[in-house]
């Protein structure tokens, strides 16, 4: 078991260097707390490699990866559009944002799970599980992938401390679109014509609807900011008038 663990760790760690999931880990670390990202990656990786070991060791089968890659690509496209949309937070929501909730954990976990289904690291884990101790392969491959992604998270944390929030958001959106193209290309390479047509249609619809929605949100946000600015100017003018108004003499002092 130790031999299988060490071999799996080495193979998966090297395979992850420069892989899209490592870049995804860095992207998420730019936006969210590192321990949430690392925890979500660990859960997703554990689940994916459990499936890999099951197919490789117990069934001796590989799973089709084209549809899985397409689903992952569409999910990355949605994440990119949502990042471009941005979020509006009131004071209460800003306080809650400091305590990252389950929604972020689930979003990161699901995106990693989809991205890794059919990925080369999953296929490598399946291959390793066919001829090695399944438990050692499962633990070793999971630790190897989490270790590689942890390096990316450190890089993301360091970059996030030196970049403006808007730059981070735009960079993250661009990376999500790159991941989407990467996954869609992998899924469509050997796909049938109906699958290609359906996928292209879904991409066009998502981009079209997303662009219209993002434009509407940004216009509404700009209008709200303009209204807030005008209200602030009125408040400042009123305060300035009050500051320059002379105090009226007290009737009590006059009677004395």
Image: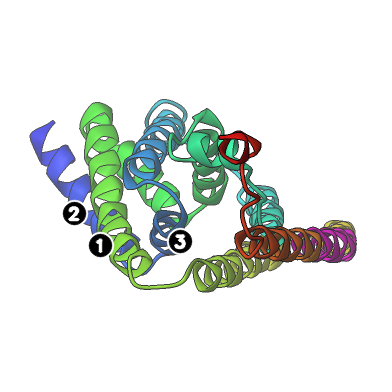
Residue 213, quarter of the rendered image: bottom right
Which residues make up the magenta segment? Answer: 204-225
- Estimate the spatial distance between the alpha carbons at disc 3 and disc 1, rounded to whole Å: 20 Å
Residue linked to disc 1: 14
Residue linked to disc 2: 10
- Image coordinates of residue 203 in percent, x first then y, are 82, 62
Crowding at dot 1, Cα within 10 Å, few <14 / some 14-19 / many 20+, comes out as some
Visible residue check, residue 61: no
Say if mark 2 contacts mark 1, CB within 8 Å: yes
Q: Is residue 217 magenta?
A: yes
Q: Is residue 26 magenta?
A: no
**Foreground label between 2 and 3:** 3
Say if mark 2 contacts mark 3, CB within 8 Å: no
Crowding at dot 2, Cα within 10 Å, few <14 / some 14-19 / many 20+, comes out as some
- Quadrant of the image for the N terminus? top left
Tell whether 160 sits left or right of 232: left
Residue linked to disc 3: 27
Depth check: give the residue in front, 94 or 206.
94
């Amino acid at each position: 078991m130790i031999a299988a663990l060490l071999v799996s760790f080495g193979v998966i760690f090297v395979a992850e260097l420069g892989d899209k999931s490592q870049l995804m880990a860095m992207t998420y670390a730019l936006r969210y707390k590192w321990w949430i990202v690392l925890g979500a990656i660990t859960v997703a990786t554990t689940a994916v490699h459990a499936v890999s070991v099951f197919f490789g060791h117990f069934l001796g089968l590989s799973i089709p990866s084209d549809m899985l890659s397409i689903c992952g690509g569409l999910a990355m496209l949605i994440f990119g559009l949502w990042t471009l949309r941005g979020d509006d937070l009131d004071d209460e929501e800003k306080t809650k944002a400091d305590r990252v909730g389950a929604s972020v954990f689930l979003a990161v976990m699901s995106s990693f799970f989809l991205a890794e289904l059919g990925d080369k690291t999953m296929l490598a884990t399946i291959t390793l599980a066919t001829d090695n101790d399944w438990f050692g392969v499962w633990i070793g491959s999971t630790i190897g992938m989490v270790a590689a992604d942890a390096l990316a998270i450190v890089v993301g944390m360091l970059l996030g401390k030196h970049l403006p929030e808007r730059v981070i958001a735009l960079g993250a959106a661009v990376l999500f679109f790159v991941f989407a193209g990467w996954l869609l290309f992998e899924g469509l390479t050997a796909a049938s014509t109906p699958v290609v047509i359906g996928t292209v249609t879904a991409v066009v619809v998502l981009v079209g609807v997303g662009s219209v929605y993002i434009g509407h949100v940004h216009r509404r946000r700009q209008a709200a900011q303009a209204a807030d600015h005008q209200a602030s100017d009125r408040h400042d003018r009123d305060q300035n008038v009050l500051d320059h108004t002379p105090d009226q003499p007290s009737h009590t002092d006059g009677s004395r």
